[in-house]
């Protein structure tokens, strides 16, 4: 039995609460939004003397720390297999209790999937509960990422996905002179990452077992020859490399500059051995920027740009390879009609995509 509560689907929330048998529920999602401002309190008041004894998956999204403490009183955390937590606002009154509750959940022997986006002070760093059994970890709103500490404490970890906070400086913190390699990890994803390639290479050297690496962010990651050499020497198992990277340029680029970048991704390693195809775009309009992305696109939303403002070259020939769809992962497209004429849009068929249209 799965329970999800959203205002638009629940005409009588109190009635729904009365119909729920907490002894039967295995999945619970509570989402605290402005439209459902008092429903969390109503839920807590109804179940404060009852116990969800069989919950396997718990998601608490957008709640405050007071609610977090009260909700967990009616949850058997020993049975949790998956836990997601989003706390948007910090409350110093609950600093110790929230950290203790989070640590208790992370330590559960049955927990395999953990996702959280919480105030930095609550992130269990530099120390995690020792010997966690978590296999899949997702961190949102991250400012300081300490991979060595995490991998040392999570010996069963298979995947890490980190989304950095865009409004603040963020850092990847590596242990000084770290030479320990971690072979348990096979998938690593970064979103909104802004760093130097040297630091990124230092991190990747520690996880040679990777077979999937995804990079979305800003930085000078445009040298295909450098990537080729590094992957061949240090990431022998990597078979899926996704990226969407951009860098603002203070000087003008021309077609020859874009050709120079794309040429470094046209070696047999990229085209024949790995079959990894890329597109490089230079946006002429201010602010000028260079964009490089793998195909298919690894982002879920995009802004459609008028082609005359872009110099675009690709190693992928859509005419000769119809089996690879560029747009497979795209769910939302934003089109600004103040800068584009409708018939300029590509004729490519896009299935199951939400399109946002904007006019000045």
Image (tube, helix red, strand yellow):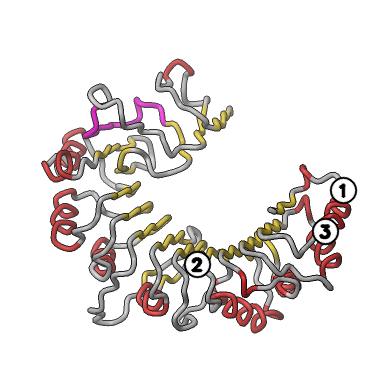
Work out whether residue 215 or residue 232 is closer to the camera in this orientation and state it.
232
On the image, which quarter does residue 233 sit in? Answer: bottom left
Q: Residue at x 38, y 75 (%)?
A: 155
Picture disc at residue 12 = 1
Q: Residue at x 51, y 36 (%)?
A: 332
Secondary structure state at the residue bearing disc 3: loop
Q: Is residue 151 above or below residue 233?
A: below
In the rendered structure, which segment of residues is drawn in magenta?
A: 305-317
The residue most toward the front is: 24
Picture disc at residue 38 = 3
| Upstream in sequence: badge 3 or badge 1 | 1
- Marks 3 and 1, Cα distance to the nearest angstrom? 13 Å
| Upstream in sequence: badge 2 or badge 1 | 1
Give neighbour class at mark 2: few <14, some 14-19, many 20+ (Cα, 10 Å): some
- Left or right: 188 in relation to 276: right
- Marks 2 and 1, Cα distance to the nearest angstrom? 34 Å
Work out whether residue 205 or residue 186 is closer to the camera in this orientation and state it.
186
């Amino acid at each position: 039995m799965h329970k999800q509560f959203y205002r638009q689907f629940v005409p009588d929330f109190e009635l729904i609460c009365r119909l729920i048998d907490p002894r039967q529920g295995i999945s619970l999602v509570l989402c605290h939004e402005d439209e459902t401002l008092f429903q969390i309190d109503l839920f807590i008041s109804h179940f404060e003397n009852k116990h969800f004894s069989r919950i396997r998956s718990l998601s608490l999204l957008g709640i405050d720390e007071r609610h977090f403490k009260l909700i967990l009183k009616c949850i058997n955390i020993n049975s949790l297999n998956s836990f997601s937590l989003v706390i948007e606002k910090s409350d110093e009154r609950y600093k110790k209790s929230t950290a203790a509750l989070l640590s208790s959940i992370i330590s559960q022997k049955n927990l395999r999937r953990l996702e959280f986006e919480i105030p930095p002070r609550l992130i269990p760093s530099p120390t995690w509960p020792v010997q966690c059994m978590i296999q899949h970890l997702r961190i949102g709103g991250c400012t300081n990422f300490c991979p060595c500490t995490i991998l040392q404490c999570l010996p069963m970890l298979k995947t890490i996905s980190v989304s950095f906070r865009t409004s603040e400086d963020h850092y990847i913190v590596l242990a000084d002179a770290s030479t320990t390699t971690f072979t348990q990890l096979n998938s690593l994803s970064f979103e909104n990452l802004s760093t130097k390639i040297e630091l990124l290479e230092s991190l990747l050297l520690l996880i040679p077992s990777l077979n999937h690496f995804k990079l979305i962010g800003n930085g000078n990651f445009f040298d295909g020859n450098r990537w080729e050499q590094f992957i061949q020497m240090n990431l022998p198992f990597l078979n899926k490399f996704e990226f969407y990277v951009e860098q603002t340029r203070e000087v003008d680029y021309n077609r020859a500059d874009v050709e120079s970048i794309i040429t470094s991704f046209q070696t047999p390693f990229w085209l024949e051995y790995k079959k990894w195809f890329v597109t490089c775009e230079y946006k002429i309009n201010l602010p000028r920027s260079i964009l490089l992305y793998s195909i298919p696109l690894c982002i879920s939303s995009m802004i459609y740009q008028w082609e005359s403002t872009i110099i675009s070259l690709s190693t992928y020939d859509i005419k000769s390879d119809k089996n690879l769809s560029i747009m497979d992962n795209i769910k939302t497209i934003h089109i600004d009609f103040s800068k584009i004429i409708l018939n300029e849009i590509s004729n490519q068929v896009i299935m199951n995509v939400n399109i946002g249209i904007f006019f000045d």
